[in-house]
Structure formats: structure tokens, C-alpha cells
Image (cartoon, rainbow, N blue to C red):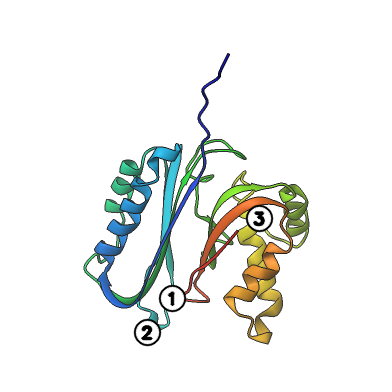
């Protein structure tokens, strides 16, 4: 007797415009529409992160919006953002977005992606898959003073890459090198995409 089943996977979407002017409103619409195309995969929460300031001004803040529920609810959260100029135009900009199906940690805003390295949003990651050794990595990072917000395995990626960056920043380490060194510490099957205020206008994806 046959059995029907549905496999749920997280969805990752990223958008980088390089020397192609786009308003923040247009960028956010692209990110949201990207998530809507991933809804068929099944999910319980959604979120996105986008660069919040002009790169030329060297004020590389990253804004993050997350919520439990549908992508349409995430749209509503974006509309409620304060101090955001939706008409501001960017020549270079990175945004990452995610739909989550809970594996580690219950469905909630804090457990949804992106996950961040710290309260200043220095590194942001969206992730699909499972990090099988995340408990060991988390324990190691906690001993080094890193504080965790979520119950996810994903957060160890963001914390680990910050730890590596802080340990190598005097050597002018690149974003790609940071990611490569981080992946060497991870076990499991996964795909991920990262952005960082230390590397504005850059996005790194790996699997």
C-alpha cells in the first residue's frame, strides 16, 4: 500500500543589484516576491534582511524583519517599519530572505531567519538544512562569551563567522575566506547565504 507524503524545506532567496539603481521599495518587493515563489515548499515563518544605508556614506547598517506566519504578514511588518525611506535609491545593495520550516526550535519570530551574529547585525545568515554538530559549536562559542538568542542550529553559523572575522580582521580577511573557514567547522547537509555590514555590497552563498 502506497503512502503519500510531503517534504518541507526552508526556502532561501537573495537579491544583489550592482551598479543598477533601484529604490528600496523595489528591492523589498523583489525580496518579498522571491519568498512568495517559495511558499509551495511549506513554511511556518519568514524573514529578510537588507542594507539600511548608502554604502558610499560608510554607514553600513543592516535592517532585519522577521515574523511567525505567512509572507503576507511579513509584508505588513515591513510596512510598519519606522525611519525607513522607501524611495531611497541604491546603486549597490544586498538583501537576503528566507521561509522557515522549523527543525531546531519552535516556530517563532526569534527562531526564524535571518539569524544574526550579534545585536549590531554584523553578520546575517539564512540557512536550509541541518548542522549536526551545532551543540558542540554552540558550547564552544558560549565559553568564548557569545550569547545566543534563538534555539536554532543556524545561529551558530552567524556566531562562528563573527568569531572568525574578529580573530582575523587584522589580516584583512575577505568575506569569502570567512565563510570558507566557517564551513570547515560545520557538519551536516546545508545550504546558506550570508551578508555582512563589514562587507557591504557583498553576498556569499555556499552549500
**Mark 1 burial class by Cα count in 10 Å: few <14, some 14-19, many 20+:** some
Closer-to-camera residue (195/66): 195
Q: Secondary structure at mark 3?
A: helix
* Residue labelled with disc 1: 201
Q: Is residue 65 among the parts visible in the rendering?
A: no
Q: Assign a secondary structure to mark 2.
A: helix
Quadrant the N terminus occupies: top right
Which residue bears the numbered disc 3? 156
**Farthest residue in the front direction?**
1
Q: Residue at position x 58%, y 75% from top?
A: 175
Q: Earlier in the sequence, mark 3 or mark 2?
A: 2
| Residue 98 in the image, given as x and y percentages of width and height | 45, 51
Q: Quadrant of residue 26?
A: bottom left
For residue 158, side relative to residue 20 (left or right): right
State yes or no: discs 2 and 1 in contact (Cβ < 8 Å).
Answer: no
Q: Residue at x 67, y 85 (%)?
A: 170
Q: Which mark is residue 56?
A: 2
Q: What is the quadrant of the C terminus in the image?
A: bottom right
C-alpha span from label 2 to label 1 = 11 Å
Position in image of residue 169 (x %, y %) = 65, 81
How far across and how far down the image is residue 96, in percent?
A: 44, 60
Which x, y percent locates residue 38?
40, 45
Query: Residue 194 or 39: which is nearer the viewer?
Result: 39
Mark 3, residues whose alpha carbon is within 10 Å: few (<14), some, or many (≥20)? many
* Label 2 CA crowd tier, 10 Å (few <14, some 14–19, many 20+): few
Q: Is residue 203 left or right of residue 31?
A: right
Amino acid at each position: 500500500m502506497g503512502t503519500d507524503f510531503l517534504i518541507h524545506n526552508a526556502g532561501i532567496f537573495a537579491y544583489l543589484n550592482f551598479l543598477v539603481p533601484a529604490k528600496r521599495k523595489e528591492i523589498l518587493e523583489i525580496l518579498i516576491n522571491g519568498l512568495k515563489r517559495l511558499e509551495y515548499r511549506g513554511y511556518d515563518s519568514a524573514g529578510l534582511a537588507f542594507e539600511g544605508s548608502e554604502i558610499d556614506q560608510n554607514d553600513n547598517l543592516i535592517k532585519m524583519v522577521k515574523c511567525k506566519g505567512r509572507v503576507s504578514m511579513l509584508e505588513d511588518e515591513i510596512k510598519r517599519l519606522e525611519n525607513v525611506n522607501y524611495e531611497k535609491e541604491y546603486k549597490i545593495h544586498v538583501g537576503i530572505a528566507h521561509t522557515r520550516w522549523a527543525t531546531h526550535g519552535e516556530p517563532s519570530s526569534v527562531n526564524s531567519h535571518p539569524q544574526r551574529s550579534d545585536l549590531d547585525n554584523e553578520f546575517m545568515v539564512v540557512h536550509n538544512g541541518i548542522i549536526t554538530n551545532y551543540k558542540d559549536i554552540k558550547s564552544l562559542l558560549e565559553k568564548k562569551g557569545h550569547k545566543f538568542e534563538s534555539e536554532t542550529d543556524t545561529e551558530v553559523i552567524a556566531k562562528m563567522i563573527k568569531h572568525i572575522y574578529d580573530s582575523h580582521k587584522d589580516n584583512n580577511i575577505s568575506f569569502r575566506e570567512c565563510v570558507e573557514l566557517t564551513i570547515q567547522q560545520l557538519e551536516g547537509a546545508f545550504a546558506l547565504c550570508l551578508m555582512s555590514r563589514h562587507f557591504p555590497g557583498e553576498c556569499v552563498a555556499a552549500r
